[in-house]
Image (cartoon, rainbow, N blue to C red):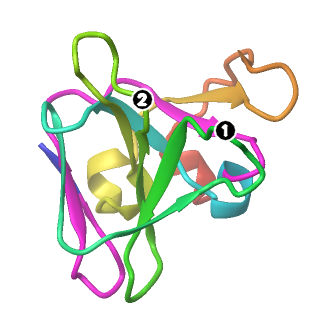
Amino acid sequence: MLTGSCHCGQSHWTLEGDPGSITACNCSLCRRYGTLWAYDYENERIAVQGPTSSYRRATKDDPSLEVLFCPTCACVLAWRGLRPRPDGRRRMAVNLRLAPPDGVADLPIDHFDGLDTFKDLPSTGRCVRDLWA
């Protein structure tokens, strides 16, 4: 199980099982936040505990997700889909930058072009540890 917590420690998340590869996105939000995402579904393999505030894109009439952050220290914890799937499941991702470095250092990073093409980019073979070098 992976865990992550905000800077002040009031809010945190857990992710059960293998997180798979991690996504670095360059959309207008993710590039500003500097996040690295691991995905699953709310209250299945992912759980968020503690107080959170949320942000929905003000420029969208019908936003598809909200970003959850700690109301005290403002660390970005996760994003959550606003429209559940037909089976009632809600897609969610947690910010792996909040996890202890040893637990995520060797996870591979996938890059996603959320700014222009909305497609996966070719793999560079880098892992989370490479971002710290």
Q: What is the number of the mark on residue 83? A: 2
Q: Is residue 22 magenta?
A: yes
Bounds of the magenta span? 4-29
Which mark sits nearer the N-terminus, 1 or 2?
1
Query: Looking at the picture, how far across and down is residue 122, in whole percent?
Result: 73, 15
Nearer the observer, 48 or 132? 48
Prevailing SS of the magenta stretch: loop
Which residue is drawn at the image coordinates 59% and 47% (left, top)? 130
Which residue is drawn at the image coordinates 51% and 41% (left, top)? 65
Q: What is the number of the mark on residue 25? A: 1
84 sits to left or right of 31: left
86 sits to left or right of 77: left
Quarter of the image where one finds residue 5: bottom left
Q: Is residue 28 above or below residue 4?
A: above
Location of the C terminus by quadrant is bottom right
Q: Is residue 45 above or below residue 37?
A: above
The three-letter amino acid code for the residue at tag 2 is Arg
Nearer the observer, 17 or 63? 63
Q: Is residue 63 magenta?
A: no
Quarter of the image where one finds residue 119: top right
Query: Looking at the picture, how far across and down is residue 24, in whole percent?
Result: 61, 39
109 sits to left or right of 72: right
